[in-house]
Amino acid sequence: MPIRFSWFAVLLALILAGLIHIATVIGLPQVAPQNAWNRLQPLADANKLVVLPAASPAHQSLPLMAPDMRYAFCRYDVTRGPVRISTQIMDELWMIAFYLPNGVNFYTISGGDINRKQIEILISTESNVLLDTETDALYESDDVVGVTAPENQGLALIRVPLAGSSYAERAEQALRQATCERVVPRATAPEQADNQAAN
Amino acid sequence: MWKLLTIIFFAGLTLFVGLGSAWQMVDYGSALTTGKIGPWSVWYSAGSPNADPYTRAHFARSGRLPITSTSALYYLATTDGDGSELTSECEYAIVGSPVDAAWWSIAAYESSGRLIPNKASRHAFSSREIALGANGGFRIVLSREARPGNWLPAGESDQLQLVMRVYGPRTTDSAVEGRITDKAVPSIRRLSCL
């Protein structure tokens, strides 16, 4: 006896297939095991800047990395307060892109957007902006770019497109001097100093 | 018994159609999410906070971190202009004019995404180092054997892919924010095969 054909079954199968399709597409960013966040997370502690090795046939930290670019990243976490990234900007090609853990690029700034050789970026969420005179001064400074992150955690990725191969070493050296660290408000600084002394 | 077989058949068909169509549209894109310019494909909403679910799923699955298309564009080619797969057994000419952008680059990879091992350690040509011809355009030769001029080694692997990155595009298509005009994308022509 052949499988019985039923228009109702076909319609039901199509509706269910559509639902599976939608659930798969929407759920994928949350469960993709090899997304960029999961690849970079083991490479660095939170609020620490790490220079990624140049892409080569033997190694790429992320898929399809540009061989003629240098990268550094910081996995920031502003749960306990704002995080400051400080880096040299050698030319207009430098680009700092901010991502949510799901890979959405919510903010980008390039060397061409600013006219200076050094940049300080203060990342915070709307709820954890520090109420401290010292950091208030930071926010108000023309030398500091404030970035409001939609979520507490995310990635800041510095890209340096190379202006010729001779530029690579200088770019890597500049990236190694870049920093990413939590801003410690003055009010809690003595406590932290005590903790450090105890350790 | 037949009723059970019918249910199993339709359940299998449902899963196949649901998962298969999702996989197809996430991995390869569709007219809703990707543009096709000759052999090059581009995800127009890559990295954008307003990206559609297919684009988000595509990049989450790929593990890449694209910059949003108003600041950077990524074109990917796995075939030549005639639609034949790029392979290291053939020689190709990539011909175009410099893109009006802060920086652009064309890099070659194996189909797995690995950079192609070669003695020259040459994997890409960027706008800052490519040699231009008398007409102001460029010509890159992608081949196994060394060639004069802009030679991009194809190595010994089978299938290849090319990625063109455009950072800070200045002349953009009025139809789509951040998109460069189609004629600014280079052609890929097969010259010969082994």
Image: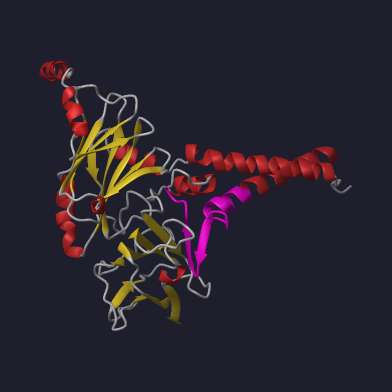
- Residue at image location 46% in from the left, 70% down from the top: B86
How many badges with numbers are in the image?
A: 0
Q: Which of A82 and B63 is in front in this view?
A: A82
Residue B2: x %, y % from top left: 85, 41
Residue A55: x %, y % from top left: 29, 55
Please check the rendered image and state whether residue A2 is part of the magenta-colored stretch, yes or no: no
Q: Nearer the viewer, residue A134 or B160?
A: A134
Residue range in magenta is B20-47
B138 left or right of A102? left
The image quadrant where one finds the C terminus of chain B is bottom left
A37 left or right of A3? left
Residue B104, picture quadrant? bottom left
Residue B171, picture quadrant? bottom left
Please check the rendered image and state whether residue B27 is part of the magenta-colored stretch, yes or no: yes
Residue A26, picture quadrant? top right
Q: Is residue B92 above or below residue A50?
A: below
Residue A178: x %, y % from top left: 18, 43
- Residue at image location 22% in from the left, 34% down from the top: A84
The image quadrant where one finds the N terminus of chain B is top right
Q: Is residue B89 visible?
A: no
